[in-house]
Amino acid sequence: MEEIDRRIVMLLAEDGRMSFTELARETGLSVSAVHQRVRRLEKRGVLRGYAAIIDYDAIGLPLTAFVSIKPIDPAAPDDAPDRLSHLTAIEACHSVAGDESYILKVRVASPVGLEELLQQIRALANVSTRTTVVLSTPYEHRAPDVKGTAEPPDAE
Amino acid sequence: MEEIDRRIVMLLAEDGRMSFTELARETGLSVSAVHQRVRRLEKRGVLRGYAAIIDYDAIGLPLTAFVSIKPIDPAAPDDAPDRLSHLTAIEACHSVAGDESYILKVRVASPVGLEELLQQIRALANVSTRTTVVLSTPYEHRAPDVKGTAEPPDAE
DNA sequence: GGTGAAAGCATTCCTCG
DNA sequence: CGAGGAATGCTTTCACC
């Protein structure tokens, strides 16, 4: 992936609704060339999708927390992500190095909602939990500085 | 905010590039009514923006980590988010309850890049750091189940 | 890979229920 | 607040370089 593709990815990371016409202006390419590049980046999986950035307070989910989980039985098969994936309060699930096995990012309506969610997580995945409540978020979802040089495989 | 607005927010959270025409089909409203609602949701800040979801491996930032920070001098003014905001490797900064003061989510190219970033964070914000490396990410950026009933102030 | 043009749609704005 | 229509602009595909 080279310069212009990186620029396209960065522009769309900042504004996911930017039009092809404007991308063309910003990159100096024709509209159809940009169109072709975006479609190729989507097909390769470099651009995995587009999402609106939401104010969670406004939609009634003002409480964010990070929940680290650790299996009760370390010998059991580790399928926690599958067991928990239907819980829509879980926004993200990362497998991590360290004492615990996963970090979940969750969004709930209230402390009681958090309590109920933690009970579900413990019961469904047979894990213990350690929860860090988010008080405020100075920033989030910042676009990366795309200057990498990785060459991804062509996933046709 | 009522039913249809919530539905619009959820649809755009799942597909940030959905057209007004399709939003109209999904909601049963006319195109112009949907258009009006989306603009109002944007103005109120319920829809804060739109972003492409990126494959960080493909753009040369394959290493994700969570960095918890704690001030060296607890009496000093706590302006870590401002001091660190120019570091583009930091994707998010959350103020948290608990032993540490902030959790940062960072994306870097390599272990060496992480080491350099941690040194910068410690020097700039006068903090100690505790880092949890992400091994893999089963899921991330999932759209919320928008069924909340919060009534945000009209930010005209 | 890139360009330019043409057809089909979507967006936007305006007027009217 | 919502609907419908008309002008404008954008997307998408095509033939060609």
Image (tube, coloured by chain):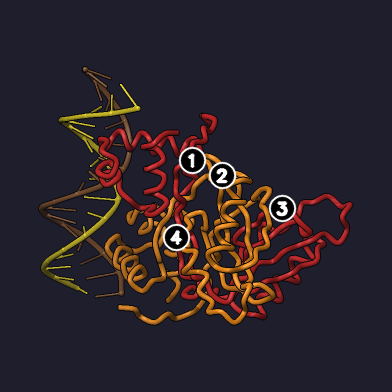
Chain colours: A red, B orange, C yellow, D brown
Specify whether residue B18 is in view: no
Helix, strand or loop under label 4: loop
Quarter placement of the N terminus of chain A: top left
Q: Nearer the viewer, residue B114 or B132?
A: B114
Residue designated by label 2:
B109
Q: Which is nearer the N-term, disc 4 or disc 2?
A: 4
Q: Are marks 1 and 2 in contact (CB under 8 Å)?
A: yes
x and y percent of residue A115 in the render? 71, 76
Q: Is residue C5 left or right of residue A38?
A: left
Q: Is residue A25 left or right of residue B124?
A: left
Q: CA distance from mark 4 to mark 1?
A: 18 Å
Q: CA distance from mark 4 to mark 3?
A: 37 Å
Question: Mark 1 belongs to which subunit?
Answer: A
Amino acid type shown at disc 1: Gly
Q: CA distance from mark 3 to mark 2?
A: 29 Å
Q: Is residue A4 above or below residue C11?
A: above
x and y percent of residue A119 in the render? 76, 71
Helix, strand or loop under label 2: loop
Tell me which corner region of the image, top left, top right, bottom left or bottom right, holds residue A109.
Answer: bottom right
Specify whether residue B86 is in view: yes
At x 69%, y 60%, the residue is A103
Residue designated by label 3:
A82
Tell me which corner region of the image, top left, top right, bottom left or bottom right, holds residue B26.
Answer: bottom left
Q: CA distance from mark 1 to mark 3?
A: 32 Å
Q: CA distance from mark 1 to mark 2?
A: 8 Å
Residue designated by label 4:
B86
Q: CA distance from mark 4 to mark 2?
A: 17 Å
Q: Are marks 4 and 1 in contact (CB under 8 Å)?
A: no
Residue designated by label 1:
A148
At x 37%, y 54%, the residue is A15
